[in-house]
Amino acid sequence: MMERLPTKVWVDALVRRAQVAGAAAFVLQSGDAERGDVLVKVARLDGTAAVYTPTMNLDGDRIFLDLIVQGIGPDEAGVDAYVRKARDRDRDLWVIEIEDRDGRHFLTEPVESPEPG
C-alpha cells in the first residue's frame, strides 16, 4: 500500500495537470486538507459529464471508480444532482470540476470504468 499525499497537495496537482493540458479546473468545495475524500466531475461541455470517486482495490491501493457503473451520468444534470447530495452528506469532501471537451479526467491513479460493449 502506498502512502497517500495530503488531499490538498493531491488536489493542487490534479488542477495543475488539467490547466497545463488546456482544460479548466475548479475547486468547488474544499474539504479536510489532510485526509478529505474527493469527487472529480468532468464536464464535456455538451450536456454530458462523468464523476469519479476514490476506492481501494484488493491490494489496498487507491483507485478511482467511474460512477457511470452505478448509473450516475452521462447526463450532466444527473451528475450534478449526485454531487449536490454528496456535498450535503460530507462537509470534508473535496469537489473538483474539470471542463474538458475530450472528457479527460487527468487522474494518475488507475480508473475502473465499465467495459465497452
Image: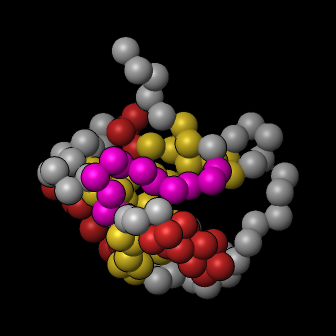
The number of callouts visible is: 0
Q: Residue furthest top?
A: 117
Q: Position of residue 98 (x, y in %)?
A: 37, 64
Q: Which of 41 and 80 lies nearest the eye of the viewer?
A: 41
Q: Quadrant of the C terminus?
A: top left
Q: Which of 43 and 102 lies nearest the eye of the viewer?
A: 102
Q: Is residue 79 visible?
A: no
Q: Is residue 116 left or right of residue 110?
A: left
Type of colouring: secondary structure
Name above or below for residue 60 compared with residue 34: above
Name above or below for residue 5 compared with residue 76: below
Q: Which of 16 and 62 lies nearest the eye of the viewer?
A: 16
The secondary structure making up most of the magenta span is loop
Magenta segment includes 104:
yes
Q: In the picture, residue 14 is in which quadrant?
A: bottom right
Q: Is residue 91 left or right of residue 42?
A: right
Magenta segment includes 100:
yes
Name above or below for residue 32 compared with residue 57: below
Q: Position of residue 105 (x, y in %)?
A: 45, 53
Q: Position of residue 114 (x, y in %)?
A: 44, 28
Residue drawn at 56 percent across, 55 percent down: 107
Q: Which residues are drawn in magenta?
A: 98-109
Residue drawn at 40 percent across, 34 percent down: 69
Q: Position of residue 77 (x, y in %)?
A: 16, 55
Residue drawn at 70 percent across, 77 percent down: 6
